[in-house]
Image (cartoon, grey):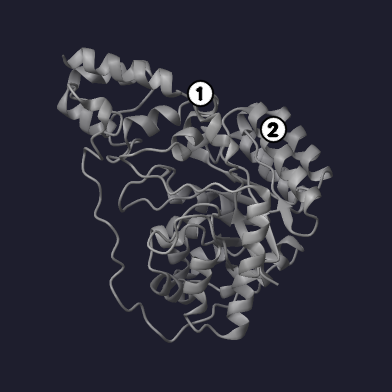
Amino acid sequence: MRIDAHAHYTPPSMVENLASFAEQEPYWGLLIAPDPINHTEQGWATPERMLADMDQAGIDQIVLLGESQQNHDNCIARNDVGIKLARRFPGRVIPFAVLQPKSGQRALDELLRCYDAGARGVGEMGPYSQGFGLEDPDFLRIVEACIDLDIPLNLHVSEEIGHFYLGKSTTPLRHYHRLAQRYPELKLILAHWGGGLLFYEIMPEVKQDLRNVWYDMAASPLLFPTEEILSVALQCVDHRKILFGSDYPLLICRDKQSSPSFLPFMQEIDALGLSNDVYLDIMGRNAARLLGRMTPKSEPVIRENGIGKEHGLKAEAGPELAASSESVGQPINRFMAVRAVAEAWPETRKIFEMYGIPWRDMPVPHWEPIAQAAASRGYGPKDQCQLLAALNEEVA
């Protein structure tokens, strides 16, 4: 059985209403909106296209994740879409519920509603993009509800270093580690290789702390060469803790695809020559066990082959991530880093503070652009334009 443990549904109809959607969900709207400067890898697929792509790749089931919605009502609407798709394609779509912890009891009620309707997990949730902390009481009540229901929780995680890209979050890896320590009975899925947290499982005490943590490989080719990351990962963790995930319909193999497809990434994995058991576990049996409420054994599987070639990651972005058309005649554009702007023009600091955007290195990283910092705090495109106008007026 092949299971893609990390997929999304972004229909072409979203394009028609992208402007209004971005006002309601600034952060997610920023990620999926077409941008001629900072090219998005977002793809679009109808339900029929998604099922056809699954059949072409030999994928039996997908875990359909929600996105990091900031608005509670939008969480409900997104969950309804997943539930309806699961009913329309029984046995092919496994819906997870997305929740906004800041909604308090309403979020817990929504979890129970979705569970009764067939949802079998929670996620993908983003602490940074949704504006909550991993020790916030409202979030921890969701964690405890997942434990009570015996369902997994999927969290978005980003690596703390390397090049910037839209969607790169700032929540430190130690916060995820602390969550796993505090709730060892939680079935925790850390997306995108857990932002590299799995590498620390080489340390015996960290391995023990993370014994009930799984890692999906969603969007992996955008960050790591497939051969190198699988080789290293299999030296760090038990292969039964690794979940195949594509982040469909994201276009993750830039040089091999121009439209949504599961095949390019799967073909890269197929070419590695993994043993049959390791391959079958990663490509589906691990997810089947997890969703079937089974816990993996803890002994690591050590691979003989080493790391090999250099990873070839992009260099870290500088203060100006990109110029955009809106910057013509203005010194500040939305893809300039907050910290760089605050350092170059100290008079802008009070504007950032008015909008609740930190400008020091901590807690804001040096690479985060104005657009993402604003969107993560609920400011839509119109508010972002006002922010830019205020900044440029201040330095004029």
* Residue tagged 1: 23
| Nearer-N-terminus badge (2/1) | 1
**Is residue 313 rendered to the left or right of residue 3?**
left
Q: Is residue 117 visible?
A: yes
Residue displayed at 25% across by 50% down: 316
Dot 2 alpha-carbon crowd within 10 angstroms: few under 14, some 14 to 19, many 20 or more: few
* Residue tagged 2: 77
**Element under label 1?**
helix
Q: CA distance from mark 2 to mark 1?
A: 16 Å
Q: Is residue 350 visible?
A: no
Number of numbered callouts drawn: 2
**Element under label 2?**
helix
In this rendering, the answer to whether 347 lies above or below 300 is above
Amino acid type of the residue tagged 1 in the rendering:
Glu
Q: Nearer the viewer, residue 175 or 258?
A: 258
Amino acid type of the residue tagged 2 in the rendering:
Ala
In this rendering, the answer to whether 250 lies above or below 216 is above
Residue 370: image location, x then y, percent: 33, 30
Q: Nearer the viewer, residue 177 or 151?
A: 151
In this rendering, the answer to whether 391 lies above or below 234 is above
Q: Nearer the viewer, residue 90 or 123?
A: 90
Residue 171's image quarter? top left
Work out which quarter of the rendered image holds the N terminus and state it.
bottom right
